[in-house]
Image: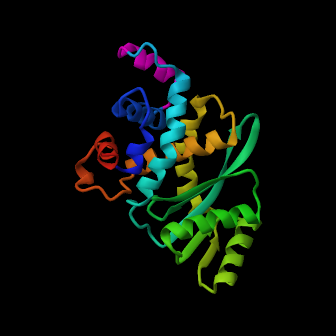
Amino acid sequence: MSSLDLAFRGMRYPRDIILQCFRWYASYSLSYRNLEEMMEERGLFDLSHTTIYRWTRKIIPVLNLLVRKRKWTVSPSWRMDETYILINGQWYYYYRAVDKNGLTIDFLLSKRRDRVAAMRFFNKAFKQHGFPKTVVMDKSGSNKAAIGKIIKDKHITINVRQVKYLNNIVEQDHRAIKRMVRPMLGFKSFNSARNMLTGIEIMHMLRKDQFNIPNSKNMSIFQRFSAIVA
């Protein structure tokens, strides 16, 4: 039995219903209450929005581990930047990176914007994809200090470029994530934000066809999702 199968043990509703709710929530501009109404139209009158919320909290961490094992390698030329996420009335920092082709490398939600947070992000990305040849970033001093310390400590060579216009690709990619976050009416806690952002990133990477799925080029997003959770 897979770890994803174990995540569904003890749940009242069928696996397909739970995965469908997650996929819709993480793919489209919907709230949990929207999903409650949509499920009611399909005959599930006793399914509440809080139940759907609990489902997503439980399955997203397991799904994240599953898809990371099937993620394709990326280009060694990276574009890194951070954006802002509103959580319970406060702004937090969301580090992200894509390669030169726009494929998602990694992401990290942080309470602070400093060298320590940037190092956490880089180390997470390096663990998944290894060391790049080039990292492009904006003029942020903390990001430059973080990658500089890693280069020094690990005795590696990475070409670091601080050229804003080259970072347009990652700034444009932020928009796909922010567009999904807006209708969610604001996250209430750091952990729920981190969890749901992971789900949104998973579906965003499925759109980009970033996972090792046979014949995925000819598949719809729904078919790719079905294949990866089978």
Please say whether residue 180 is one of the residues in the magenta stretch: no
Residue 4 versus residue 213 in the image, above or below? above
Q: Position of residue 166 (x, y in %)?
A: 57, 64
26, above or below 38, in the image: below
Determine the residue positioned at 42% across, 38% down: 8
Corner quadrant of residue 220:
top left
Residue 106, x across and y down, in percent: 54, 59
The percent position of residue 190, horizontal first and vertical second, equals 69, 42
Task: Please give the name of the residue rendered at 72% of the width and 46% of the height, measured from the top-left corner.
Answer: 92
Give the side of residue 31 with respect to residue 88, left or right. left
Q: Is residue 42 above or below residue 63?
A: above
* Residue 100 position in % (x across, y down): 48, 65
Instruction: State which region is magenta.
Output: 29-43
Which image quarter: residue 95? bottom right
- Whether 40 is among the magenta residues is yes
Residue at screen point 54% across, 69% down: 127
Predominant SS along the magenta part: helix
Q: Identify whether 164 is placed above or below 36.
A: below
Residue 112 visible to an observer of this rendering: yes
Nearer to the camera, 206 or 13? 13
